[in-house]
Amino acid sequence: MKSKKLSFGRCLKELMKFVKPYRLRLSVALLMVVVSNLTYALNPMTEGRITTQLTADAKDILKGVPGAHVHFEVLYRIMGILMMLYIIKTISQLLTSFLLTDAIQQTMHDIRNALQKKIQRLPVRYFDERAYGDILSTVTNDVDTLGNALQQTLTRVFSAVLTFFFAISMMLYVNVWMTLTALIIIPLSILVTKIFVGRSQKLFDLQQKTVGELNGTITELYGGFNEILLFNKQEDSIRKFQDVNNRMADSAFRAQFMSSLISPFVSLITYLTIGGVAVMGCFFAISGTITVGELQAFIRYIWQINDPLSQVSQLSAQVQAAFSAMGRIFQLLSEEEEDFDGIPVNPETVKGQVSFRHVQFGYGEDLLMHDVNFRAEPGQMIAIVGPTGAGKTTLMNLLLRFYDVNGGSIKIDGTDIRDMKREDLRKLFSLVLQDTWLFSGSIYDNIRYGRLNARKDEVIDAAKMANVHHYIRTLSHGYDSPVNEEANNISQGEKQLLTIARAILKDPKILILDEATSSVDTRLERRLQEAMHTVMEGRTSFVIAHRLSTIRSADLILVVEHGDIMEQGTHEELLAKKGVYEKLYNSQFAHQETGSIKE
């Protein structure tokens, strides 16, 4: 179910929470912006005084006034003041850059940490409904887009506002009527900006969404690169990528082009206004209402008004992209988390009794499980069999609270798992999946992932029980041998054995093996079964298996079909019922016999 898009005001409020710890640095940086813009506003008037002084001196000299000359001492004094203004402006800009960069980068650092923590607390359902590449795009591209926009636009926008007001104040000081004429720039520029921003914002939203799709497509294609080569689907992959890439290019072009139209239109308005004000100013200067230097300064102030409007138009693309990125970031941060509260559970006191009572569950509105009931006593081996897609793994996902039941209850030692702390609940389990997962690091680190305080001899014992110790010793660096980022420098079978060793080392109260032996050959499987029987002694174990020969000794076999348990009992009891299990069993062995005859 898609979450409702957050409003801009809500996003801005959430952003302020991350900015708050660095508000002192940010405040000082903005104070330096005020100082910088104040000196910037005083510069044209100070420069105009030089022009006015030179004009007055030139008039006196041309008129032949006795003792007339260029008053260099006045000019030097004005130039000294001008130099001080330049120095103060430069220093304030340097301080602004340093403090602002520090505050913004620290804020982005905190946002990335918050996103990472949030992802760890999101329910599995969230990841089932979204592409990994889209989530990755939020954590990387969107945070970078927001950070770059804040870095490059915050001071420039704030500076633009200050420049605007300082310039108008100085213009009013020079001449009110000229100022009122010049201010026609503002409503016309706002109108132009509003028209183009309104049309381009939707395009920027589409652009950011397409970036997420592009990342998702890249993740999918490179994740299945070997399969693409195997089935000669390179051309299909190229076409799929090109389709998303073309839509990305199209949306980016339309967004950027629409946004870029603001600047030339604002500049046109400014040029026309300057022309009109210059003519008016000349008449005022001739009549002596203003000086030549004030007219010069006034023209400069018009450009200072144009600068904020021009900057806003130039930054509009970046600002709008940042708004879209900010929306995606805080949308993720606002997602509903898993509930980690509950009754603390001490693993040492747990016996391992598991019961499903009238459990109902569905991934959507339709129920997959209607009335699931069974009971596993401490130390029992429970086998779960059934066709692909029957709901075998879903049973274990419910037991681990990756999903919560729609109805009924699941209890461990008589306590409803919904009342337990999720963290404590999951400490009771070791899970070995058909799809192995190893991280970049050494083999030793991968085995002790479930119990980081394990000793080296305990890691070795776990590897021996999983029948992977001999393989590790054949490697050049033994237990210190590296596993690369994709873990493709180790065979699939050996990876499976390493994950089983990891599960053994954790020493769980309840063990779950989801097709754990599917990736090993028959010889290794036989040795592994012996090791697993040793491991399963004294603990409750759930084994999901397609090979029915491996679960004959199970204390209880659950036959799952269409999400519900159709039959349950021991191997002999189920065969005697001559129901679903007998058909599965006979069809599997008939298939094996047929296969051996063909060979």
Image (tube, helix red, strand yellow):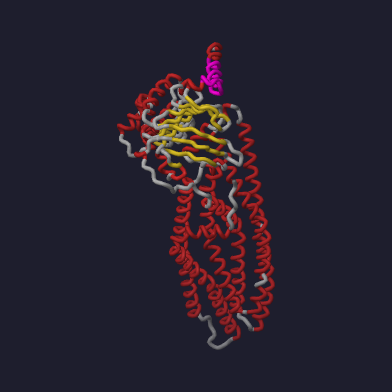
Dominant secondary structure, magenta: helix
Q: Residue at x 64, y 36 (%)?
A: 239
Please identify the quarter of the rendering in which residue 595 is found: top right
Residue 83 visible somewhere in the drawing: yes
Q: Nearer the viewer, residue 494 or 155?
A: 494
- Residue 454 lies, with reference to residue 580, above or below; the image says below
Q: Position of residue 64 (x, y in %)?
A: 59, 86
Q: Nearer the viewer, residue 134 or 320?
A: 134
Q: Position of residue 60 (x, y in %)?
A: 58, 84
- Residue 283 lies, with reference to residue 571, above or below; the image says below
Q: Position of residue 16 (x, y in %)?
A: 50, 60
Q: Nearer the viewer, residue 323 or 372?
A: 372
Please identify the quarter of the rendering in which residue 363 is found: top right
Q: Residue at x 53, y 72 (%)?
A: 43
Q: Residue at x 59, y 53 (%)?
A: 5
Q: Which residues are magenta?
A: 575-592
Q: Check the picture and name the quadrant holding the C terminus.
A: top right
Q: Nearer the viewer, residue 324 or 281?
A: 324
Please check the rendered image and state whether residue 174 is part of the magenta-colored stretch, yes or no: no
Residue 515 visible somewhere in the drawing: no
Q: Position of residue 221 (x, y in %)?
A: 57, 35
Q: Residue at x 62, y 79 (%)?
A: 175
